[in-house]
Amino acid sequence: MANIVKNAVVALKGFAMGAANVIPGVSGGTIALLTGIFNELIEALNALLSVSSWKLLFQGKVKDFWKYIHGTFLLWLGGGVIVSVFSLAKLMEYVLAYHPIQTWAFFFGLIVVSGVYMLCDIKKWKVTDGLWLVFGIILGAVICLLSPTQTTDASWFILICGAIAICTMILPGISGSFILVLLGKYEYVMSAISELNWPVLIMFGIGCVLGLAAFSKFLHWLIAHYERPTLITLIGFTLGSLVKVWPWSDKVSVLTAQLMRDGQTAEQAQAGVQALVDIGTDLSTVVNPQIFSALAWMAVGVLLVIALEWFGHKNAKA
């Protein structure tokens, strides 16, 4: 029974990672770090992609292979991620389209309080620790403030997108989905997931495997040799990403959602907002900030993390 509960919890963490990975600005790696499985995830991926593990398999030592790669952990975690991505892709598209302020507010509250908890776990701070934190914050913020580009839909580029995105999807603070936005392929890939466009998904998946093979080993090496500066920098990444998650940062999306909730189609709303932009209208004068609603959802995010921390400490003492 204990193993079933443990595996179910891992699957739920995978589900949360998958949900985060389909939202531009939120990192699945951040969720892994917050839920205490980041180190095990990197260790498991590194083991899975090592020569030693496959030697065990080819020698017929299946049980040893499964134990060496943390097979049960990866199976339940991966299952949760896959179910989440395919089941929540449409839902995330909907809430980001119609309720962007509340969605971003929830994740803003979640990330802020999670960052505070992670910083509190760092003991005996040194000057160099502060420098690594500042470096991480600045780098995370700069990456999140980059502008999207127009790119090709060619298969080779989709493969490259998969390789780059998967690296950032396991890296706390840098959203793989946001990297897809920067590469001009977020809507394209989300559409492929929703519509089960297998040629696109296969090329993207191959890119993910190749990227994961290279990056997980590098990250495993960093943690093994420079654990403290690496983790502090990753926390900085997480906090730096808040510039992207600020609920009112994208006034165009907020106003578009406002018009769509009033009954306009997406095309009508986008055209209306673009017309306002073209004539130089200050969108902040026509946007409904929904401050109380945003604060409520921020509070939900904060309370969720506090509850998870309390539950985790309670179980640790039991």
Image (cartoon, rainbow, N blue to C red):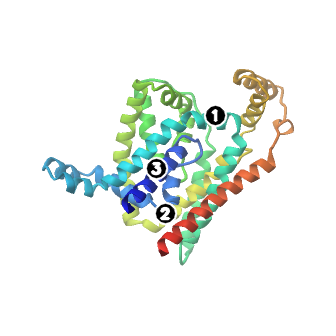
Which is closer to the viewer, label 3 or label 2? 3
* Residue on which the image places disc 1: 94
Q: Residue at x 65, y 46 (%)?
A: 244
* Residue 201 on image: x %, y %: 42, 30
- In the image, taking residue 12 as reference, residue 239 lies left or right, namely right
The disc label shown at residue 300, or none? none
Please, is residue 292 above or below residue 187 in the view? below
The residues tagged by marks 3 and 2 sit, at their Cα atoms, a distance apart of 21 Å
- In the image, taking residue 175 as reference, residue 51 lies left or right, namely left
Q: Counting other residues with Cα less than 10 Å from the Cα at mark 2, is it few (<14), some (14-19), or many (20 or more)?
A: many
Q: Of residues 30 and 61, which is closer to you in this image?
A: 61
* Residue 318 on image: x %, y %: 47, 74
* Residue on which the image places disc 2: 231
Q: Is residue 127 visible?
A: yes
Q: Counting other residues with Cα less than 10 Å from the Cα at mark 1, is it few (<14), some (14-19), or many (20 or more)?
A: few
Q: Is residue 115 visible?
A: no
Q: Counting other residues with Cα less than 10 Å from the Cα at mark 3, is it few (<14), some (14-19), or many (20 or more)?
A: many
- Circle 1 sits in a helix, a strand or a loop, which is it? helix
Cβ atoms at labels 1 and 2 below 8 Å apart: no
Q: Of residues 82 and 189, which is closer to you in this image?
A: 82
* Residue 44 on image: x %, y %: 34, 55
The disc label shown at residue 14, or none? 3
Q: Of residues 174 and 53, which is closer to you in this image?
A: 53
Amino acid carrying label 3: it is Gly
Please, is residue 40 above or below residue 176 in the view? below
Please, is residue 175 above or below residue 269 in the view? below
* Residue 189 on image: x %, y %: 50, 31
Q: Quadrant of residue 91?
A: top right
Amino acid carrying label 2: it is Leu
- Looking at the image, is mark 1 or mark 3 earlier in the sequence? 3
Q: Residue at x 77, y 27 (%)?
A: 273
- Looking at the image, is mark 3 or mark 2 earlier in the sequence? 3
